[in-house]
Amino acid sequence: MTSNNPLVSIIIPLYNAESYISESIESVLSQTYQNIELLVINDGSTDNSFRIAKEYESDKVIIIDQQNKGASAARNLGLQLSKGEFVKFFDADDLMNPEMIESQVKIAIKNPDSIISGKWGRFYKSDINSFQLCREECWRNLNSITWLKLSWKNALPMTQPGIFLLSRKVIEKAGYWDERLSLNDDMEFFTKNILAAKKVFFCDNAILYYRSGLGNLALSSLKTPKGIHSNFLSIQLSVSYFLSVTNDAESLRLAANIWQGFVYEAYFIDKKLANAAEKTIKLLHGSDYKLPSGKVLRFLSLVLGWKLAKRIHLIFRQH
């Protein structure tokens, strides 16, 4: 039975975010909803992140130090140690509006078997005035399959952890974070959790401020062989979850488009995985996803084919 004032656990994996972690923690502690616990799991930071986080330690704020095992392992540890009926995973460089938790909890109390989403937008580096909402078609109350279909529509699903408030019992049903994954670990986690939920409810008054423009500091910019392998496995798992519950023509096309986006990203880093993805696309009856690039590259792609066009583009970027 859900109480009218349930405990919410907010879990932050922390790795080398000394410039941002104070803002992130303050963003949590400034929430209008106060029945919260904050667990910050320092994942072997080599800068001053852990020392800064320790300054906030209190009855409400638990700071844990572990050897570097990755964000997924840090989140799982936080989940195991936390006590909240509802859980929000939050990144060490992001911010949330003061009413986010309170607004999402009000909906979650009435719908404990569902996931509560919210708005999100980007701001660049430390300039909050650069913030702009990134509106999506899935910003409404939807059943799980329809939510995923709309989220995957442009082959760029956004499942940044801080957007969502999750019921612990949904997580226990769906499964924890896959610790094999680094890049794109959130896609796998939220695909299986959204499918395990009864519904996804949209909260209009919940806003995630997603810090962008961090260059090589951002995990999503690390297009290394390890990152590409993680992305491949995450997509492979996510697509398998999705197609196990819906395999109509639209679903097959959406899955193929997700794979095509991977091919564009991975082709010049790991051709073996890119070729494996292309074989999967054929099995899914093909993709209609367009190269996500500027006008010049799109034009070159029409004339030369996207692989040669992208190679030329990469050469020019290096000079």
Image: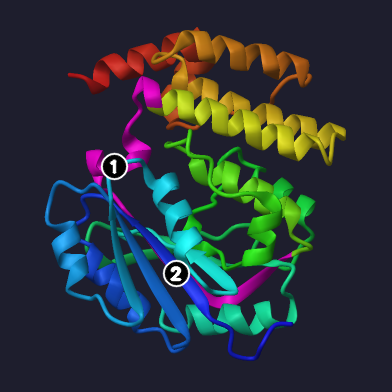
**Mark whose residue sits in front, 1 or 2:** 1
Q: Secondary structure at mark 2?
A: strand
Q: Position of residue 284 (x, y in %)?
A: 77, 21
Circle number at residue 5? none
Are the residues at dot 1 and dot 2 in contact (C-beta closer than 8 Å)? no
> Does 232 lie within the magenta span?
no
Residue drawn 71% across the image and 55% down it: 173
Relative vertical location of residue 292 with respect to residue 114 in this rendering, above or below: above
Q: Quadrant of the C terminus?
A: top left
Q: How many marks?
A: 2
Q: Secondary structure at mark 1?
A: loop
State the residue in front, 199 or 83: 83
> Does 225 lie within the magenta span?
yes
State the residue in front, 40 or 83: 83
Relative vertical location of residue 24 with respect to residue 93 in this rendering, above or below: below
- The residue singled out by tag 2 in the image is 10
Position of residue 45 in the picture relative to residue 272 (left or right): left
Amino acid residing under circle 2: Ile
Residue drawn 27% across the image and 44% down it: 67
Q: Position of residue 68 (x, y in %)?
A: 29, 42
Residue drawn 56% across the image and 43% down it: 187
Magenta range: 200-226
Relative vertical location of residue 40 with respect to residue 7 in this rendering, above or below: above
Can you see residue 291? no
Query: Badge 1: few (under 14), some or many (20 or more) residues near its Cα, within 10 Å?
Result: some
N-term mark: 1 or 2: 2
- The residue singled out by tag 1 in the image is 68
Q: Quadrant of residue 259?
A: top right
Residue drawn 53% across the image and 40% down it: 178
What distance separates the C-alpha of mark 1 from that of mark 2?
Answer: 20 Å
